[in-house]
Amino acid sequence: MSDHYFVGEAGVPWGASEKSAWLAAQTQKRSYAELVEQRIHSLETRFNLEQYGVLSSADNNYPLYALTSRNWNSELPNVLVTGGVHGYETSGVLGALRFLESEAEHYAEAFNFLVMPCISPWAFETINRWNPEAIDPNRSFIADSPAQESSEVMGYLDRQGLSFLAHFDLHETTDTDNTEFRPALAARDAKPQDHWDIPDGFYGVADSSRPSPDFQKAIIESVAEVTHIAPSIDGKIIGVTLQQEGVICYDGIGLGLCMGVTDAPYVTTTEVYPDSSLVTDDDCIAAQVAAVKGGLNYLINSKVVA
């Protein structure tokens, strides 16, 4: 893959000059202020809004926001929803916002919510997986994180001192994973990357240390009412053996993934496929909301929530 990437020399890991060349090629393609911030501020009358940091880049400073339940009840379990860890994964951001706008208050008697709709605003604007330093935030939820996006989230959660029952981390898997982002990774690290077919449909990723299969199954069943579930290839999705239909497992904590940022027993990373000919952009957003609702309903119906 690295032989064909536009930055760097094949077989040589990137240094500062290659990362600078890559950054110089990135351009703003949409507005965080218009598409995300405005909707966040429109929710101020219904949720508590806090700016937990500022993401600084060469061209802009991006406020980072968290919204929490207006009537926080310490007797209720807490649920974390995160979107936009990878800024190019659009329905993760818009799905988190739509959940707040249309569904969160319906669950106010069962849960407290903390929602961070867009963790990587620079990447949202430039439609990128990486941050401006060519670092993947979703491999950077670790001590002394090299990614400001990740360290700001971890610092904020540490300051809150909360325990969570569940965490929904909203993502997408796109065609550009194979055409742009994996070739870029191969070039940056001078390491070949395995090729896999992009799954046509929704799938979920459980944390292998707390797989909670019934919780994952409820999410898949809820999403299936909105859009199609990704089929497996030889019992695998993106090269990983299925846990069950539409679900694989990753080592969330060991890989520094966002879904490993809390010790919540019920954790999932959603993966929507926006490039399918079978879905619209709105279907993808609806699938994210359905995933959260499916998980919450499971927690209520299975008596996990008193």
Image (cartoon, rainbow, N blue to C red):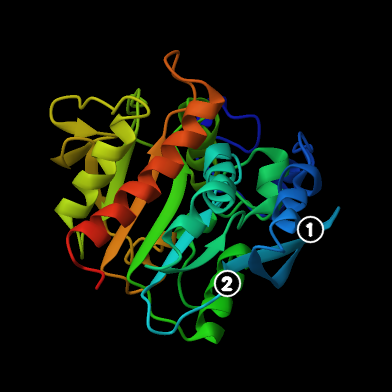
The crowd level at tag 1 (other Cα within 10 Å; few <14, some 14-19, many 20+) is few
Depth check, front residue: 85 or 130: 85
Q: Name the residue tied to disc 2.
A: 151
Q: Residue at x 65, y 38 (%)?
A: 127
| Image side of residue 101 versus residue 296, left or right | right
| Image coords of residue 71 (percent x, y) | 55, 75
Q: Nearer the viewer, residue 268 or 125?
A: 268
Residue 256 falls in image quadrant: bottom left
Question: Number of marks in the image?
Answer: 2
At mark 1, the secondary structure is loop
Identified by mark 2, the residue type is: Ser
Q: Residue at x 28, y 27 (%)?
A: 230
228 left or right, relative to 176: left
Task: Name the kind of residue labelled 1 in the image.
Answer: Ser
Q: Residue at x 24, y 73 (%)?
A: 306
The location of residue 255, given as percent across then percent down, is 36, 60
**In the rendering, at what x and y percent does residue 113 appear?**
48, 67
N-terminal label among 1 and 2? 1
Q: Residue at x 67, y 64 (%)?
A: 65
User: Which residue does the numbered mark 1 point to in the structure image?
Assistant: 57
96 relative to 145, above or below: above
Task: Tell me: residue 267, above or below residue 128.
Answer: below
Decide if residue 192 is in sight here. no
The residues tagged by marks 1 and 2 sit, at their Cα atoms, a distance apart of: 15 Å
